[in-house]
Amino acid sequence: MFRLRRTVVLPLLIALTVALIITSLLVGGYDITLANLFTDPDAREMFFISRIPRTLALIFAAVAMSVCGVIMQAITQNKFVEPTTVGSSQWAGLGILVMLILAPNAAPMPRMIVASVFAFIGTMLFMFVLRRIPLRSSMVVPLVGIMLGAVVGAITTFIAGQFNLLQSMSSWASGGFSGIVRGFYEPLWATVIVAILAFFLANRFTVAGLGRDLATNIGLNYERTVLIGILMVALATGVTSVVVGFIPFLGLVVPNIVSMLLGDDLRRNLPWVAVVGICFLLACDLIGRVIVAPMEIPASVILGFIGAAVFIGLVLRQQRRVGA
Amino acid sequence: MSAPSPRAARPLLRLGIVALIAALVVAGFLLLMIRGSFSYSLGVRSTMLGAMIIAAFTQGVGTVIFHTITQNRILTPSIIGFDSMYTLMQTLMVFFFGGTVISNTEGIPKLLAQTLLMVIFATLLYRWLFSGKFGSLYLLLLVGVVIGMAFSSLSVFLQRLLSPTEFDLLSVKLFGRISAVNPEYLPLAFGICALIGLVIWRRRHRLDVLLLGRDAATAVGVNHRRELTIMLMLIAVMVSFSTALVGPMTFFGFIVATLAYQVTGSHRHQYVLPMAFLLGIITLAGGQFILQNIFYAGGFLTVIIEFVGGILFLVLLLRKGTP
């Protein structure tokens, strides 16, 4: 069974991802085919200005959010945790709002730094609250996170309303990938660094997840490892938020699917987490692009629905297993 | 009623004091700090007050009943997605029948049809959720919250598929705001609330029994499943009205019910229910008055309620974490 999965499912997955990437490159308002890419200079120009940046942005964002989910789930030892269910993304949103108010014309770089700092504060706050939960029931943890996110969201809405920025905030939150062109997505390369780093630190996060005492016994600097993990999550969340807005549930759905398929070896799973994440986000984005063409539905909306459904399925599945 | 014993007199006294405060707040809200035309201002504020009364009744009473039938004080209809279900229902109607449904079938038949749809779906879904197959309250809560999120994403998705005109029609009709209520709905809403209030009042002792749990309630001859269904249906109706008039408010019912338990000093529904209603009025009218006249931010009452309520909810959730 296990070998079958590895030999059949994984090549299929790669084939699917490649197919999705090619489709994503070719689908859009401007007619680009593989043939006229070589003959028509206009088509080629459009291809490099819009299609490639968009597809790359999708890939980076998918990798970033999926890997964030893996790191957070390892650190907290909770399968239902990821940047949007602990409030990191909402904090990043608050950071973006603060920049909109204080420095409306700021370049992307400072905005990303501020968003990342806010995401860091938010994640630290969540970890702090988490330590105060006496009963670390796996259900209470995401609940607390979602509620923290809701409170921060309410603050953001309030401030945005006071400064007449509600519309810019809502168009940011559901921004998606439609506005991505050359010169705007490049900061997302930073998430690649986070992903590579995550690969090398994977085993440490796993150990940290066993708890402070055990981790320290094995010889791990617990506090530092957790802090590094949170910093990585904050950086990836902040950068992704500025460029593409919210990407709900991706970091939750993807790692869970992968660990169902492959088991719980964090480091071995990470590349597959990235692949499945790319597959998932590209598919959602393509659905959104095709279904109401020439208009678009943001991938985050589709992801929100599918992600929520998968989330409920996972919760019920775990419940059944515990109950049995 | 026989002569009140000292134990029973206390909640009654408290109820009286809160009623007095509510009356003062309402009078202040209606009459104080009026700039410009008195009669115009009074008219606008009375409409707002009408909406507030409906919201206080539906959310306050609805939440207390919900707490009773689910035997917890954390879950509320709004937190586990009744509001988003209402939004989804509205969106689905426009999606399948076109924007003309909303503008053509104005008034009572439309409201009733919508409410009926909402009642059917909410009762089915939540009766399934509360059928007792979920072991823990937190699991139930988590599933409810996420179902709510799924509903709102699906609504946004469907709204994006609508034509711009249909979308405009929908968004105008979908959510009321306290500061911009459509006065035409008020008489009907008052009538239905009065009717619901009557039904609930007649069942107040049964609700007391339901507090004891399914087994105890069955033992003293209350049909638990039937009561659960009836109450869920009433709650669905109330949430539809509240959302249609003042928009979704996730934590308002939660705040009001939590306060009511603290203030009343009794578990009996004949005291808790009116108390929740009165506290709701005080919160809404007082909050709106303060925001409007001191902070000049009249449109943000619901946001502030969300904020305060969210924090209160977190605190209670964390405190409850100890088994």
Image: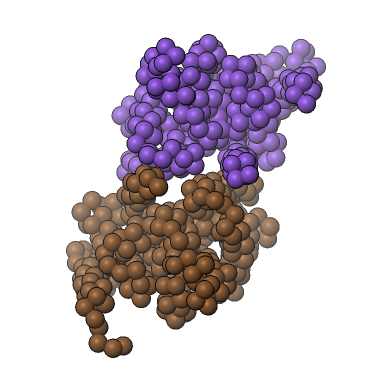
Q: Position of residue B167 (x, y in %)?
A: 58, 52
Q: Is the N terminus of chain A in the top left, top right, bottom left or bottom right quadrant?
A: top right
Q: Position of residue B88 (x, y in %)?
A: 58, 55
Left of A237 or right of it: where is B91?
Answer: right
Residue at 26%, 54% in the rendered image: B291
Left of A159 or right of it: where is A257?
Answer: right
Q: Is the C terminus of chain A in the top left, top right, bottom left or bottom right quadrant?
A: top right
Residue at 27%, 67% in the rendered image: B265
Q: Colour of chain B?
A: brown
Left of B77 or right of it: where is A52?
Answer: right
Q: Position of residue A52 (x, y in %)?
A: 64, 18
Query: Quadrant location of residue A125?
Result: top left
Q: Which one is in front, B150 or A136? A: A136
Residue at 39%, 22% in the rendered image: A213
Residue A309, above or below B300: above
Q: Colour of chain A?
A: purple
Residue A107 visible: no
